[in-house]
Image (spheres, helix red, strand yellow):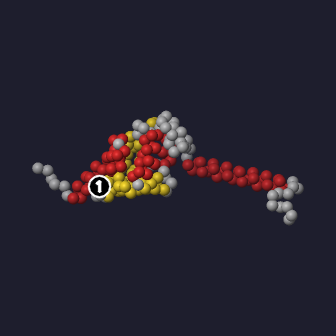
Amino acid sequence: MGTAQTPSEDRRRRVHETVMAFVAGGDGDTAKLRALMTDDVRLHDFMGMGAALVGSDAVLEEFFGPLAEAIPDARFEVADVLVSDGGAVVRGEFSGTFTREYYGLPPTGRRVRWTAHDIYRTRGGRICEIWLGNDTLQVARELGAVPRDVQPWTAAETAAETAAETAAETAAETAAETDGGGETAGSAGR
């Protein structure tokens, strides 16, 4: 005879089942994914830009749809799951082949992979909030948006140096035009 689950254990089991079905991508079935989310689900900080997608249609059409098209063999291998009565944290590795354009990025045809730490909150047995904790720099590198060997702080230094050089050149050109005896824009009549 088995041991009866407490209400809290039962809720955690249901949360685990819901989140794992969602992470599995509803087995490729959009209707299954939609059924796992509340109508007002909120995907926070979409694309790392602070914006949120609100509603199951928006999450499916603006996140899952384009991702599934760009990386049709996408897989998420779960490494760890921490479950509470109201949600779960999932750590795992996303992988697949980048074969079609994704938000303006041309496909590379390469296998891509990155680690994710995602947080899911549930309500009434369905997912109501999602925070995707991807390493944005690693994702950008894997998709070919940022060279693999460029460090962000190096890129920032290079951009600052370029801006300083451009400002110095512009100042020198302006000074040469003014010293050359000609009038500069806005100096007429002074």
Name which residue lies at 79% across and 52% down. Answer: 173
Farthest-out residue, left: 1
Q: Please indicate whether residue 45 sits to the left or right of residue 163 in the image.
A: left
Check disc 1 and report its element: helix, strand or loop.
loop
Of residue 82 and residue 97, the one placed in the foreground of this image is 97
**Residue 125, quarter of picture:** bottom left
Of residue 157 and residue 109, the one placed in the foreground of this image is 109
Residue 135 position in % (x across, y down): 46, 48
Residue 3 position in % (x across, y down): 15, 53
Is the residue 166 above or below the residue 187 in the image?
A: above
Q: Please indicate whether residue 39 sits to the left or right of residue 9 in the image.
A: right
Residue where numbered disc 1 is placed: 125
Q: Residues within 10 Å of mark 1 (few under 14, many from 20)?
A: some
Farthest-out residue, right: 181
Residue 78 in view of the camera: no
Name which residue lies at 71% across and 51% down. Answer: 166
Residue 149 position in % (x across, y down): 55, 41
Residue 39 in view of the camera: yes
Q: How many marks?
A: 1
Name which residue lies at 45% across and 54% down. Answer: 53
**Residue type highlighted by circle 1:** Gly
Name which residue lies at 45% across and 36% down. Answer: 97
Farthest-out residue, bottom: 190
Residue 71 position in % (x across, y down): 44, 39
* Quarter of the image where the C terminus is located: bottom right
Of residue 168 and residue 16, the one placed in the foreground of this image is 16
